[in-house]
Image (tube, rainbow, N blue to C red):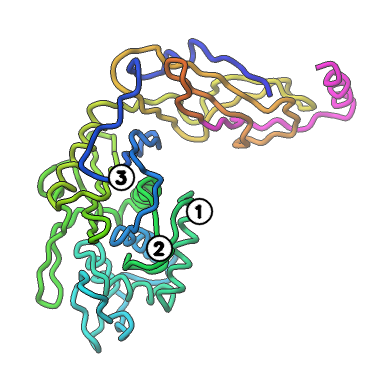
Amino acid sequence: MKILRLLSLVLCCLPALAQALPDNPKLAAKHYALYDLTSRQMLLEQRANERIAPASLTKLMTAYVVFGALEQGKISLGQDMMPTSYALRLQNEEPRMFLEVGREVTVEDLIQGLIVQSANDAARVLAEAVANHEIAFADLMNAQAKRLGMNNTNFKNATGVPEDQHYSTAHDLAILAAALINDFPKQYAMYAVREFKYNGINQFNRNRLLWQDPYVDGMQTSYTEGEGFSLIASAKRDERRLVSVLLGADKENLRSTESQRLLNLGFKDFESKMLYRKDQAISSIRIWKGTEREIKVGFRADTFISTPFSEHNKLTAQLETKQPLIAPVNAGQRVGTLHLSLNGQKYLDLPVFATETVSLTNVFSRGVDAIRLLFE
């Protein structure tokens, strides 16, 4: 492996940094995570990888799978569904939109009930609409969890009703919330709806931050006797969006106030700035047996980094590349990692990609490079 040091080009583009990372705040909750969607960084975590019963927070994945089915044309908003007796069975005291046997309901109303009312009956009917049965739908949920990198999550149902081997973590739920916002921005707008009326019954969204904070526009609440009160919230200020996951508050009002504290800390104590633009060359590295001697490397998308506010020029960078790098190499192919350190401590690793294609050279030149490599 070959390590290249990046100096002025990196440092001129870096945001202000604190001398040390802020300590995790003490919040009245068992677990929490704070995620910055702009930089795709986890800013703060406490016991965020411990497994919990996600309860109604499960419905974020239910919605994610349903939104995917809508985009794929498997279901449509205007499609009428006839609830089955299985879907309408009452499991203890659970949130419902009060669907009725023998009365059709549109997919659009079901989604509103799922999101605004956190309705379990809506979740089960939607699961049947997409996969014919809730058990098969749970398989789809787990496939998406695996694809998103939710490595400490497993779903057994679409509602979050407690079952063995139905679990997640604050870290994984933050990943899920961010994916839902990024992948389905139009549908995400429904999470800002404060109330929904169905079957003559008007119900209000349990996310009180929709009333208390003008920047908050979602997402999901939950409560169980074992886990307490929980809230996943998202707020956008200017062009920056954060997701907070707060699990296990003792009181309903605490899940709102502590979530707001967490979001405020993220906006106040951290900033996100662009490090490099898409396809901007951060360096050129040696390539062997190619039509060029060097290849430019950078990032496949605009790359932001979130750092604590305060001092500048505390971040250092090292570019580690695969050596020897042998042609052919295609644009977009990963060729290394940019290691970022803050005050001498590891801070963040970013994958680095070729920004151009270098083809294989002729036989004679390849032979020359093969001999040179013997002496490298």
**For residue 184: magenta?**
no
Q: In this view, does 89 lie to the left or right of 171?
A: left
Q: Earlier in the sequence, mark 2 or mark 3?
A: 3
Q: Of residues 348 and 332, which is closer to you in this image?
A: 348
For label 3, count other residues whose C-alpha is less than 10 Å away and answer few (under 14), some (14-19) or many (20+). Answer: many
Q: Which of marks 1 and 2 is in front?
A: 2
Q: In this view, does 269 lie to the left or right of 298?
A: left
Quarter placement of the N terminus: top right
Q: Of residues 55 and 101, which is closer to you in this image?
A: 55
* Residue positioned 76% across, 26% down in the render: 291
On screen, 143 above or below 36?
Answer: below
Amino acid tagged 2: His
Amino acid tagged 1: Arg
Query: Disc 1 and disc 2: Cα gap in Å?
Result: 18 Å
Q: Name the residue under label 2.
A: 166
Q: What element carries label 1?
A: helix
Q: What element carries label 2?
A: loop
Q: Name the residue under label 3.
A: 31
Q: Are marks 1 and 3 in contact (CB under 8 Å)?
A: no
Amino acid tagged 3: His
Query: Residue 82: where, in percent of width, then height?
Result: 30, 84
Q: Of residues 118 and 298, which is closer to you in this image?
A: 118
Quarter placement of the C terminus: top right
Q: What stretch is highlighted in magenta?
A: 350-376
Q: In which image quadrant can residue 214 be found?
A: top left
**For residue 361: magenta?**
yes
* Residue positioned 69% across, 34% down in the render: 329
Q: Do the residues labelled 1 and 2 touch (CB within 8 Å)?
A: no
Query: Residue 116: where, in percent of width, then height?
Result: 20, 62
Residue 147 disc label: 1
* Residue positioned 27% across, 49% down in the render: 247
